[in-house]
Image (spheres, helix red, strand yellow):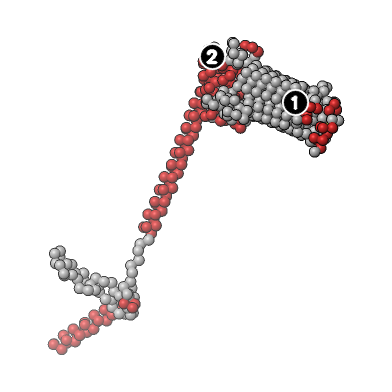
Amino acid sequence: MSSGTARAGARAARLRRQAARRAPLGPRLPGQRRGAPRRPPAPTVLVPPGDAGTGPPPGAGDPAPGPGGAAPEPRPARWPRVIEVLAVVVASIAALATVVVTREQTVNEVRVTREGQITDRYTSAVDNLGDKAAEVRLGGIYALQRIMKDSPRDQSSVVDVLSAYVRTHARGQTAQDAGSGRPAADVQAAFEVLARRDPHRDGRSTVDLREAHLANVSVRGTGRAGSSADGGVRPGTDTARLPGANLSGAVLESANLAGARMNGDYLVGTRLTEADLPRADLRSSWLVGARLDDARLNGADLHGARAIDASLRNADLRGADLRNTDLRGVDLTGADLTGADLRGAYLRTQRVRTAHGKRLPYTSRRSVAVTAHQLRKAKLDDHTVLPPEVADDPTLHRRQHR
């Protein structure tokens, strides 16, 4: 009985060992042989608080050593971090887009509001120009000047309005202040606004003051000393900027336009008697039939101007630039030509249709009134076409070819 029980116990023990060997072992750790049982993890020893100097034994809780005795490093979870970064980037882009859209909307709203305000100001200023009170009209003129500064794109319309105002209110002697002989206050103010503007913003508009009566007109200086105390500009005056303006038939007698920029102006038949034009820029201007008797043109630049049949009696042309100027039929009686540059100028009196190989659009039937004595003081060259009356003068001949 006892021997059978012993045999049964031995057999059961053998079967348990075989079952243990055949059981699944799970993934192998680095360095573990196939079929070898896994080492159970070391127990974690909890140290109660306050037990100083005691702790788990060395190596307790450490992961199993890998090949060569080094513990394996745990792999960090990367996807949560990537998702977090992407979320921050998307939120930043959305915030930036919102700021940009909001800014554009704000800018558009401000622009629309500003344009509406300028339109209201423009309408109010134009209405003031038709008021009977001079003070109200002056306020309208200076309001238009402010609009030109605040809104450069509206300058062309302001130039047209003020030009029409001057033409309408500067007709004949009614435009003059009683006793002073100067333009009325509103006409003077409108002229000064036009003369002080920036011509580069005019667009397609030009200052059109045809047949306006502007005797003794000037551009009063904004400061006490004006633009310059010498060099041709009087103290208390500013430089007029009127390039390309149409002043044909206008009356500018005794006008103070020292140093004025009037290049390319149309001055056909304009009356500039006794006008102050020292150092004025009159390049390529049209002075056909203009009257400049007793005018001060010392140092003025008339290079390439057309002064056919113009009258320059007793004019001061000292140091003036008259190169390539068409002076057919001009009256230079008593004019001072000391130092005047007449190189390439055309003074021939006979009727011709070409000069220097170029076709001339106009011709003159009058003779040039000038003497050899006057021309001896001027600068000449072999391209200067002299009148037949003085062309044979030996002194002039030597000056032309020296």
* In this picture, residue 185 sits left or right of residue 344: left
Q: In the rendering, at what x and y percent does residue 284 appear?
A: 71, 30
Residue nearest the viewer, comparing 395 with 240: 395
Residue type, label 1: Ala
**Mark carried by residue 284:** none
Q: Quadrant of the C terminus?
A: top right
Residue type, label 2: Ala
Q: In the rendering, at what x and y percent does residue 25 appear?
A: 30, 75
* In this picture, residue 219 sits left or right of residue 54: right
Q: In the rendering, at what x and y percent does residue 175 appear?
A: 61, 13
Of the two numbered discs 2 and 1 in the rendering, the one whose residue sits closer to the viewer: 1
Q: Quadrant of residue 44?
A: bottom left
| Residue visible at 71% across and 27% down in the picture | 317
Q: Quadrant of residue 286?
A: top right
Secondary structure, mark 1, is loop
Q: Quadrant of the N terminus?
A: bottom left
- Dot 1 alpha-carbon crowd within 10 angstroms: few under 14, some 14 to 19, many 20 or more: many
Q: Quadrant of residue 258?
A: top right
- Dot 2 alpha-carbon crowd within 10 angstroms: few under 14, some 14 to 19, many 20 or more: some
| Residue visible at 75% across and 26% down in the picture | 307
* In this picture, residue 158 sits left or right of residue 23: right
Q: In the rendering, at what x and y percent does residue 265 appear?
A: 68, 27
Q: Earlier in the sequence, mark 2 or mark 1?
A: 2
Return the residue at label 2: 134
Residue nearest the viewer, comparing 259 with 45: 259
Residue nearest the viewer, comparing 196 with 27: 196
Return the residue at label 1: 307
* In this picture, residue 78 sits left or right of residue 218: left
| Residue visible at 64% across and 12% down in the picture | 173
- Residue 212 visible (yes or no): no
Mark 2 and mark 1: span between their CA atoms?
Answer: 39 Å
